[in-house]
Image (tube, coloured by chain):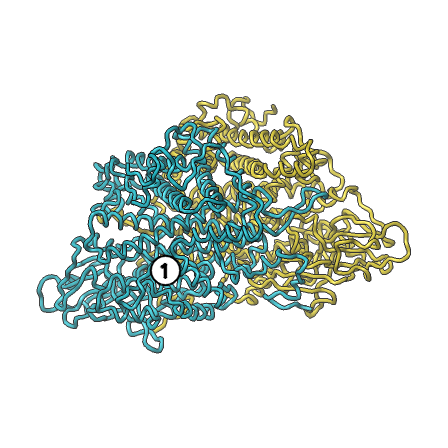
Chain colours: A cyan, B yellow
Amino acid sequence: MSNSTQEDASAVPAGLPRRTEDGPAKLRMKADAAQRAAIAAELQAALDGPFAASRAAARDLITDRNLRPDDTLPLDEARERTLSQLFDLLATGAPRGAFRTDHGGTGDIGATLSAIETVGGADLSLMVKAGVQWGLWGGAVENLGTDRHVPLIRDIMELRVPGSFGMTERGHGSDVQALETTAVYDRATREFVIHTPTPMAEKWYIGNAAKHATMAAVFCQLYTPAGDYEEQDAGQDAGQDATTVPESWGDSHGVHCLVVPLRDADGKALPGVGIGDHGYKGGLKGVDNGTLRFDHVRVPRENLLNRFADVSEDGEYSSPIESDGARFFTMLGALIRGRITVGASAGSAARTSLTIATKYATKRRQFAPDDSMPESRLIEHRKHRLRLIPLIAKSYAMQLASNKLISRLAELETTVPDRTDMTKEQSANQRELEAHAAALKAAGTAHATRTIQECREACGGSGYMAENLITTFKDDSDVFTTFEGDNVVMMQLAAKELLTGFSREMGNLGPLEVVRFGLDSFGTLLKRRTAAEKIIQSLVDSVTDRETTSLFDPAYQVELLTERENRLLMSLIRRIRPAQKMSTADAAALVDSTQDHMLSCAWAHVDRIVLEALLEAEAALPDGQAKQIMEQIRDVYLLSLINDNSGWYQEQNILNGARTKAARAALNDLVDSLGPWAETLVDAFAVPESVLDIPLLADVSDPTALTFRCDTHPAAGMQG
Amino acid sequence: MSNSTQEDASAVPAGLPRRTEDGPAKLRMKADAAQRAAIAAELQAALDGPFAASRAAARDLITDRNLRPDDTLPLDEARERTLSQLFDLLATGAPRGAFRTDHGGTGDIGATLSAIETVGGADLSLMVKAGVQWGLWGGAVENLGTDRHVPLIRDIMELRVPGSFGMTERGHGSDVQALETTAVYDRATREFVIHTPTPMAEKWYIGNAAKHATMAAVFCQLYTPAGDYEEQDAGQDAGQDATTVPESWGDSHGVHCLVVPLRDADGKALPGVGIGDHGYKGGLKGVDNGTLRFDHVRVPRENLLNRFADVSEDGEYSSPIESDGARFFTMLGALIRGRITVGASAGSAARTSLTIATKYATKRRQFAPDDSMPESRLIEHRKHRLRLIPLIAKSYAMQLASNKLISRLAELETTVPDRTDMTKEQSANQRELEAHAAALKAAGTAHATRTIQECREACGGSGYMAENLITTFKDDSDVFTTFEGDNVVMMQLAAKELLTGFSREMGNLGPLEVVRFGLDSFGTLLKRRTAAEKIIQSLVDSVTDRETTSLFDPAYQVELLTERENRLLMSLIRRIRPAQKMSTADAAALVDSTQDHMLSCAWAHVDRIVLEALLEAEAALPDGQAKQIMEQIRDVYLLSLINDNSGWYQEQNILNGARTKAARAALNDLVDSLGPWAETLVDAFAVPESVLDIPLLADVSDPTALTFRCDTHPAAGMQG
């Protein structure tokens, strides 16, 4: 075992405490406002991670432009407002990081993603619109295109060409490989013919499409002429019934992406292009989602984004990647930014909601124990602390894991710009990154959904008033569990990667194929740790005696989560191995019956990698009060997980009932310990004051200075 | 032990199976459409319970008027639309059940509540507006007023006087006893002076107030002249600073309710009345919530709703109930209809959402195991069944429990019209009813919040489109966990009643007082069972051998939930007993530290009474397929609870790890068994076809018959 610390292997690595006592360390309770602000700043620095500058710029933009959702605007106004904010965001320069320096960008993808994430903490419509423009539409052309597309990339970057990302279809959202839109090469005119063969093949939910996009990256099944023949008539014969593919279309090459113009300079749809408008959604009123339909729309051959596959003038198909499946997944792999941004931004919205609910809870008073005592502040109730503080702790953990993911993406994009020629190690890294992006997308968005709901309820009636923003964050973030990959599908994808040990050879297979042909032997599973994670490995190796080890001990904590991940994966493999010798139908049924188990594996994995991100951040903090607080945040995160899985830990004889009870009691102690620090904890989220300038917080900040709202209420004037 | 069946005590009561095998009974899978419809009808009859006729009438109204939420309307239009629908609802006669026959009503409260609940399955704005008008405003005058208020009651019933329920204040929502608005009797003019002393005393979130109410039932701290003196000048001296009460106000009598006119015939606010408008909320766009402020508004003495307390012309206060606290809780007890309706209606919205998501899941296809096999329907995935079927089962259980609650309310209102002279048994029944109303309100609304969220996600992108209604149900129902009593407060209230054994003497105390002075001895706790529940008691008595008893055995199931309730309550009492000898501050701290434990007790209680409602409904079904399905629904409900609490059951040595694992496996078996019946299960909810006429269901019903939505989309026309 490599030893990344200067101490001996059995000791705790530098920067992390070895706890044996069964209780949280005492926090120094007496801290004045300046000391608290200093601690919040230190915690904020840890949370901002390597992206402090881009986050600061985004916060300035939020403050300058008073960015925040406005649920009272009519649909059209909301959409135009968000479009104009997009130009504000461009003016900060943040979007240019999504593009390479030789394309006119800054190449600082970490800066762009963290800026968009930060904007998500103020207005998710703007975040999504930015994500569509620069992340999805720009990202498709940037990552799937070649030199001939650079002028377009510059136009996208500078918002001269607003565009859409035309992947999802009415009939196929999560199962992208099965989508139906066709692109058939017509050798005669050197054009592709883009066509929507069935109503189920319409592109649906497409951001920017209903109003603003002038072009789209459209994902299609690509066909090129079979062999060498004279007459090729895709444009003529391809009728609306595409259940059978006309022989004249030639060979199928699977899903590819092409640039398709949608609107003319006056904003009118081009001939053959049908555009629908989804109108009102559950939220994201500022985003104009629409539908796209193509009736034999012709685009030049050069509109194929040809980085991973090309079609010559005379219709010859070529690709550096032989298998259709492998090529498809390589293309998708180049597009994971969107997925990463979605998970990160959901977390950002959750942090804003937690900041609102926590500040409210530290001021709002209700219920006196009896007439002799004052009314308690909400945070002084144990249950209220149990509602908010574990969610705050998890928000810390998720943000740190998300930072790490963004850093890894930036590193990989820098070191391996050309994805077609990776080493085995690079390929495994890329696969792991994809799996983590999927898993953290699901975990982050699920956390946000739960957290914002809890914050709404914890603010009572005030939380339900649109002026206090929480309901809009709830509405806007609600689809985050669905778009950029449905959470259940994402977790299955992550589980599949766990089953293959992130192997390149296996990663292109579907879940059933993985099970039938690609189960890794357990020996090579789970052993991957990046260099940065050696500190974690030495922690795990340092655990000597499980029975007596403290639940507060970081080494034991990692072991508890690692053990859960390993056992769940081992038992899953035992369950599905028989499928290898079954008929397809039987094997599919068996694999489906383990679906819940498979998802549990992915959750166990993500729980563990998130803990490790927390530990790394804690280890990097200098000794002091902020570090002690971070330690307790880590304990809250861990003990919440133990509580949530206490049945499993007992079933597995890893923890007995006395210890799971102790975990519950310890969590209570911890929220009591952190209760007086609650506001400091959320101050570290650094939500701009302009977002927090809402009636709900004004209402409680100084009741004696309040005015009658009947006279002043912004929503409507007083009557009478 | 009384034996309510004709069999011997150790046998299973008539109507319930005694299971020893560890697996669900085989359901007959081959059933044609007619057979399935017959089974759905039988299940529907069980769910409709004693309220089939009123539910049918409400369903007819929904169909006739095409009632459903419309999220695309501007605020004002949405409000006017809901007001006009209120007249439609009145035309069905349903609201008249909320009023006694001698007041011009029909006295059939069960019919009214179940009709309003059913409307909630189509449009929660209308449900809430109806609840405000007839349940809260009408209910206050009906239940707190006397003969002199009968003309007003008739006007309310016939919608001639739209009104508000002015209880909640900006500063005090859940803690109603602490509200600040004052009503001071002025002997000189024989009027009450209604005043809002501080900004925090404004009435907030008041339904109907922003636009339509012409009067309100306003809850105030009541003051009458102290003794006999000449000069009484409440109208003059009571300034806005009411932190000290002027001596001239006289004696305080606690919270009382008075009728206060708000608007003149032109809709203009009356002098001294300030009305604000909350504008946009998280949902319920059709309900005009507003704020109310009173500046020394004078109302005649007769406007006091004087059923439980009166003030004579010369200012003498009298009440049949001596203690202010007891009187207050008696008043509140008369107003639990609202709470019951809220819980029931949330369930109704959850059932509609489940119907949409389940029908979608039985048709929508995505993902083929491999190219040789067709794409699977969503319901064919185990995880999808695990998402929906336990929520369907719980929805059955909650509706049956809610029916029972409504029936008990109706029975009690009939047998004990005058609440001031109850027998000890009647009083305990009333207390239990209040506790169950609080607990089921919290459990029902929490279930709805979780269920509608899951349904939204289970429908993917389609679920996020406003046209498919789920997001509006989510938005509209979201505040149900807060209004009519915050869920945390409701569960504490229920726990408090458990601690006092529903005793009248103790029920008026606050939680801390209960603990310090009112802890019941455990001997008398939990022993109450109504006559109708004797079947349950004999079940419990029939369990002989825990170790081998099947988890499918209904007797053992009741025992498992009863044991959880009993043990949690016993250990809670052990924890809080020391508070009896502590200082107030220490006792309050100790009690607060058990808050989570207290809430667990209430949850355990509600879980048990809900199971019992399921068992009673199952026992009443004739033998056959519907009954077998109901049995499996009960098993799913129970096993889900065991899974959720598997950590606790192991800690307590009630179930070992092998049995909790078996419970998880059994739940999987059950959702597999019920999967093919999923659509039948939701058909029994009898959601009107007009509510289900949404694009999401049309999209999947027959993909070959679909048109291109770009051309036909209702939200916006095609462009280009």
Identified at 63% across, 38% down, the residue is: B589
Q: How crowded is the residue under tag 1: few (<14 C-alpha within 10 Å), some, or many (20+)? A: many
Q: Is residue A29 visible?
A: yes
A59 relative position to A709: left or right: left
* Badge count: 1
Identified at 74% across, 65% down, the residue is: B272
The one of B497 and A505 positioned closer to us in this rendering? A505
The one of B39 and B450 positioned closer to us in this rendering? B450
> Dot 1 falls on which chain?
A
Above or below, B500 relative to B140: above
Q: Is residue B50 visible?
A: no
Q: Position of residue A517 (x, y in %)?
A: 21, 41
Q: Position of residue B391 (x, y in %)?
A: 46, 44
The one of A498 and B277 positioned closer to us in this rendering? A498
Q: Position of residue A28 (x, y in %)?
A: 55, 43
The three-letter amino acid code for the residue at tag 1 is Ala
B330 relative position to A591: left or right: right
The residue at which mark 1 appears reads as A111
Above or below, B254 relative to B87: above
Quadrant location of the C terminus of chain A in the rendered image:
bottom right
Q: Position of residue A555 (x, y in %)?
A: 39, 36
Which structural element holds mark 1?
Answer: helix
Above or below, B362 relative to A716: above
B345 relative position to B460: left or right: right
